[in-house]
Amino acid sequence: LRRVYRDAGLAAPVESELPGEITSHPDCDAALRLLGRQGELTALEPGRWMWTEALRSGIEAARNALAGREDIGPADFRDVWGLTRKHLIPLLEYLDRTGVTERTGDARRFTGTGRSAQA
């Protein structure tokens, strides 16, 4: 599990996309929760986990690349992170929920606060 999520970076798979040899293991769910409690994984939403260090690095990269901008659109984040909408939108929604970004219409701005992965 560690290797899968670490290697995936910001394009982490949802649980249903994990390799069968992982999901078929009876302790898969418990292992995901344990890695979450230990801070190695961050739950973006039910069934969607991300390697915490990748999340921190991604937030920092976006903050640096988009510094001083007020109306940041999804395409701006996509360009920084190189993600498809499949991975981009859940990540942006997570950042909104945790207060890292604030959404107004289709635009976002970094708040300077938030609890996402201690970023």
Image (tube, grey):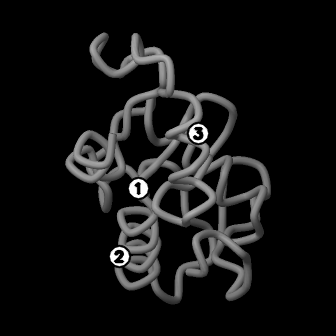
Question: Where does the image place residue 36, in percent across and percent down from the top left?
Answer: 58, 54
Callout 1: few (<14), some (14-19), or many (20+) C-alpha neighbours within 10 Å? many
Question: Where does the image place residue 71, in percent across and percent down from the top left?
Answer: 62, 68
Q: Amino acid at mark 3?
A: Pro
Which of the 4 image quadrants contains residue 70?
A: bottom right
Between discs 2 and 1, the one toward the N terminus: 1
Q: Which residue is mark 2?
A: 61
Q: Quadrant of the C terminus?
A: bottom right
Element marked by disc 3 = helix
In the rendered image of this protein, does residue 57 appear above or below residue 19? below
Residue in view at x 68 percent, y 88 percent:
112
Judge depth for marks 1 and 3 and give the one in front: 1
Q: Which residue is mark 1?
A: 51
Which of the 4 image quadrants contains residue 116?
A: bottom right
Q: Amino acid at mark 2?
A: Ala
In the rendered image of this protein, does residue 78 appear above or below residue 20? below
In the rendered image of this protein, does residue 109 appear above or below residue 36? below
Q: Amino acid at mark 1?
A: Trp
Q: Quadrant of the N terminus?
A: top left
Between discs 2 and 3, the one toward the N terminus: 2
Residue in view at x 37 percent, y 39 percent:
12
Q: Which residue is mark 3?
A: 90
Between discs 1 and 3, the one toward the N terminus: 1
Residue 65 relative to residue 97: left or right: left
